[in-house]
Image: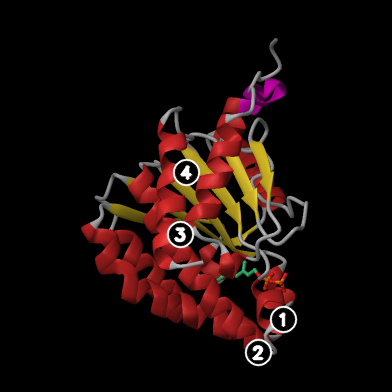
Amino acid sequence: MKKSEIKALEENLLIQIKKNPLPEHIAIIMDGNGRWASKRKFPRLRGHHAGAEAIRRTITASRELGLKNLTLYAFSTENWRRPQKEITGLFSLMTRFLKKETAMMLKNDISLKTIGDISKIPIGPQKTLIETIEKTSHCRSLNVFVALNYGSRQEIAYAVTRLIQESEKNSLSNIQPEDIERFLYTSGVTDPELLIRTSGERRISNFLLWQISYAELYFTDVLWPDFSKKDLYNSIIDFQQRKRRFGGL
Ligand code: FPP
């Protein structure tokens, strides 16, 4: 498709989106970098590089649309099982990405935040992460949450542990959902209304299990490195056509 045709298609989709309220928070399970690379006989890391480009495109498109929160599943607690070379490559790619994109984030009033236990991440990348979080902490238009060393069951177990540590003993006989929520990494952030997973897999894979209780799920066969503005727009249009009842009628 020609560039001008893609632009016309995007504009047409944008007009449809504008007619309805937007989700405030979109979460994405970015999947398929490895398959994208092997289809081209490239090493897996080339797929992750192309995946980082898709991250940049998605952040830009989210900001243009006026989304408030975007949460991206970049590295799970299970991903430590991958070969050491791939893990090192992923973190060094993330470090370069953050250094390169900080200026873009500041210019567009975008803050970077993380969910997950980043204390276990190699020290160099960890430092860059913390620096980027601090530098962009005053930005308000869009929050980008990157899930790193993140697992939802671990998050809930950690929240319950913190709740027990900080509670009077006799107040623990009647724990309410809000009590647990207070200690989740996402405390204070609107739950995602829309969860997208790319690459044709239809699983949640230990991602935001608590927070997606009422989210609409959107699965696409597009591999993450190919995910474009048009795909984000299509997911939102699909979302806007659904009837959300939250258990009511
Ligand atoms: C999914 O594909 C790959 C990831 C979730 C890693 C994403 C991380 C990056 C692109 C690194 C840059 C990070 C930031 C925050 C800029 P997969 O490897 O699971 O693909 P497969 O299922 O096809 O093997």
Alpha carbons under labels 1 and 2: distance apart: 10 Å
From the image, state whether disc 3 or disc 2 is nearer to you. Answer: 3
Residue highlighted by disc 1: 39
Q: Quadrant of ligand 1?
A: bottom right
Residue located 44% across and 59% down the image = 5
Dot 2, crowdedness within 10 Å: few (<14), some or many (≥20)? few
Question: Would you say the residues marked 2 and 4 are in contact, meaning their CB atoms lie under 8 Å apart?
Answer: no
Dot 3 falls on a residue whose secondary structure is helix
Residue located 49% across and 40% down the image = 25
Q: Counting residues from the N terminus, which is met first, the one under dot 4 or under dot 3?
A: 3
Nearer to the camera, 159 or 97? 97
Q: Counting residues from the N terminus, which is met first, the one under dot 2 or under dot 4?
A: 4
Name the amino acid, label 2: Pro
Residue highlighted by disc 2: 43
Dot 4 falls on a residue whose secondary structure is helix
Q: Is residue 237 visible?
A: yes
Alpha carbons under labels 4 and 1: distance apart: 29 Å
Q: Position of residue 72 (x, y in %)?
A: 54, 56
Mark linked to residue 6 = 3
Q: Position of residue 89 (x, y in %)?
A: 56, 85
Question: Would you say the residues marked 4 and 3 are in contact, meaning their CB atoms lie under 8 Å apart?
Answer: no
Rendered view: 201 above or below 185: below
Name the amino acid, label 1: Lys
Mark linked to residue 13 = 4
The magenta region covers 167-177
Q: Residue furthest top?
A: 249
